[in-house]
Amino acid sequence: MRRRTTAFAAIVAVAAMALAGCSSSGGGGGDTGGGSGSDDPFKVIAFTSGNQTPIGAWWVKAVQAKADENGWDLTMIQGDFDFQKMNPQVESAIGQGADAIFDGFTDYASIGSIITAAKDADIPIFAMDSGTEATDGFVVNITTNQQKLVDSTLGALDESLGGLKGKNIMVIGHDPHPGIRLRASLAEKDLKAAGAVIAGGEIQKVKSPATGRTEALAIVADYLTAHPDGLDAVWVGWDDAALGASKAIDEAGSDAKVTGSDATSEAIAAIQAGGSFLATINQPWPEVLDTVTDDIIAFQKDGTMPKENFIAVDTTLVDKDNAADITPSDKL
Amino acid sequence: MTSTTVPVQPRTSIGKFLVQGGTTIALLALIVFFFAMRPDVFLTFTNVRNILFQVSILAIVAGAQTLVMVVGDFDLSLAATSSLSGAVVASLMLGGMPLAPAILIGLIVGLLIGIGNGLLVAYLNLSAFVATLATMTSVIGLAYLVTQGTTLFNLPPGFNALGQGRLLNVPLPVYIAILIGVILWAVLRFTTTGRKWYAIGGNVEVSRLSGINVRRGRLMAFAAAGLISAIAGILLAARLGSGSAVQGSDNLLFSVAAVFLGMTVIKSGQANLVGTMVGVAIIGVMSNGLNILGVNSYVQQVVTGLIIIAAVTLSSLKTRER
């Protein structure tokens, strides 16, 4: 028994020394970068929960290319929308030391523990499209201007319908996505202000992005059955659901118009086909990535931090006139 | 020797059959309620066609789930299998393969996944929950690989017509769902295979002692379910004109709910095709009716769960009274 206890104590002692060794060699961030002049490669932890979306998949590849180009030691963590899996992985990577963290398309509300761990380790987080308002958790977050996005799409509907006043317009949103939630609420507010009638009385909410197209299809088909002439347009927060709404309108033989957002190749093709899909929005993610990368490089060089911690860039309306000139978001 | 419980459906009149279970009562109550709320819309041809169109894919997946639940198992991978099959067909056709061989390969994919599940459950004795959960995880991954995480579209018009075409102004998927439903019902009701499946679901040991090849029976049920879910996935891709890794993922939960609802329709409480279709109808009628009434989708989700509980509870109370 005594021999077992001694052996156990020895194992614990060895493990403790090993852990101490690990923590002293890599713990704490910001010790090799930020203009420190160290010869160690600049260590970047990049993570996204949206790697299974086309844009998220593009981002993973694009950030890897940026890392190769700039000689970063990159740790890429892909979360598959599973924060219970992703957050501990990122926190573990932070524990092993890094110079900078790059968040792609993951809302700050879902990564509170990562933000805390990064602050504790004094590692700055650079982000793109990771929230719709400024937060101290990021040294910079560049996203798209949701108000201008809404202005563009409502402008297209206004022009197509000959004014919004008195028109029945459905708004379809998805609350768990902060960007879609914000722009849907802005669209509802602006439509009401313009004198339009919100079809169904409120924002129609799709529950799951995975079934967004079929959910939107059913919502619009059922609405048109109940109100055959009661729909002039459907404003949708993202293209996949907009395609479902468009299909319901076409199948019902309605003249209603649809707008989406994302500029997917399928949406662009639908716009070019000249059916009910009127317009979508192109968000300049490659340019945003370049800007955030420049910010990280400036920090790597001499510790310079971005001047603003929240930037909202303009978007481009995609309609029949310019659809052929736009690179679809899923073909970046 | 103990006899196996093969559900012999009582030869009652249609009227008696309709009032036999709480689930059927719930369906009728829902129809009456929504008709009373919107008499000008709810039972019109256009809206009934809407409902049938909206539930046709779910009806096929639920039919597949019924087969597996008849033998006492369940399959969590059916919706994922259907998505993968649809994505495979879409991918092959976009690569230039003609319609028929692409569909055939999509069906084979579903069949192989079903056989894989059957082997894991029947021959390696893994629990159906663990085996099909693991399969579902891998199949979803495969679907992402096939689609590269994107939505595959620009499918041939001939293929899209399978899901969007109409015969006598009724969408083709409705006919296909009815055809598959009738075939499954006949297989379960009139064939030796169906009887064996019910016997296995009733009591595995007694079935084995009675000379039934239990393993082969369970394998066949899983294989058939995989094949049928592939049909559903291919039809969904044709209906939407696109294929993606996760489309139709809600069919898993709803198919299980439909089978459970259907199990309350007959006295024996076993999975049965007619009951499953009643369950599918409840889900479809409720979704459509609540949409027509303009009920918030979050409230719809809550109400759907409550209606399922109410139907099953009502049926349970009736059973106790007997």
Image: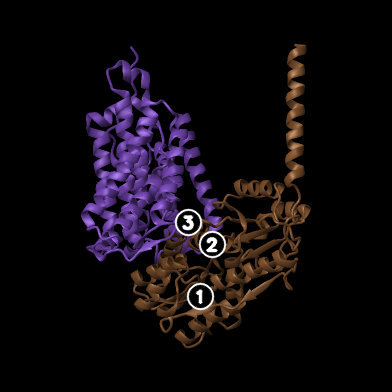
Q: Residue A210 carries which label?
A: 3
* Residue B10 versus residue B167 in the image, above or below: above
| Crowding at mark 1 (Cα within 10 Å: few <14, some 14-19, many 20+) | many
Is A143 or A91 nearer to us in this picture?
A91
Q: Chain A is drawn in which colour?
A: brown
Chain to which the residue tagged by mark 1 belongs: A
Q: Circle 1 sits in a helix, a strand or a loop, which is it?
A: strand
Q: Which of marks 3 and 1 is nearer the N terminus?
A: 3
Q: Name the residue under label 2.
A: A65
Residue located farthest toward the front when viewing the structure as drawn = A39
Q: Which of marks 2 and 1 is nearer the N terminus?
A: 2
Q: In this view, does A100 lie to the left or right of A217?
A: right
Residue A326 appearing in the image = yes
Q: Which of marks 2 and 3 is nearer the N terminus?
A: 2
Q: Name the residue under label 1.
A: A281
- Are the residues at dot 2 and dot 3 in contact (C-beta closer than 8 Å)? no
Chain to which the residue tagged by mark 2 belongs: A
Residue B17 appearing in the image = no
* Residue A244 versus residue B27 in the image, above or below: below
Q: Is residue B43 left or right of residue A205?
A: left
Chain letter for the purple part: B
Residue B315 image point, x, y percent: 45, 37
3D distance between C-alphas at marks 3 and 1: 20 Å
Is A222 or A149 nearer to us in this picture?
A149
User: Which residue is pictured at 31% across the width and 45% down the height?
Assistant: B109
Task: Give the mark count.
Answer: 3
**Amino acid at pointer 1:** Ile
Residue B306 image point, x, y percent: 53, 47
**Quadrant location of the N terminus of chain A in the rendered image:** top right
Q: Which mark is residue B92?
A: none
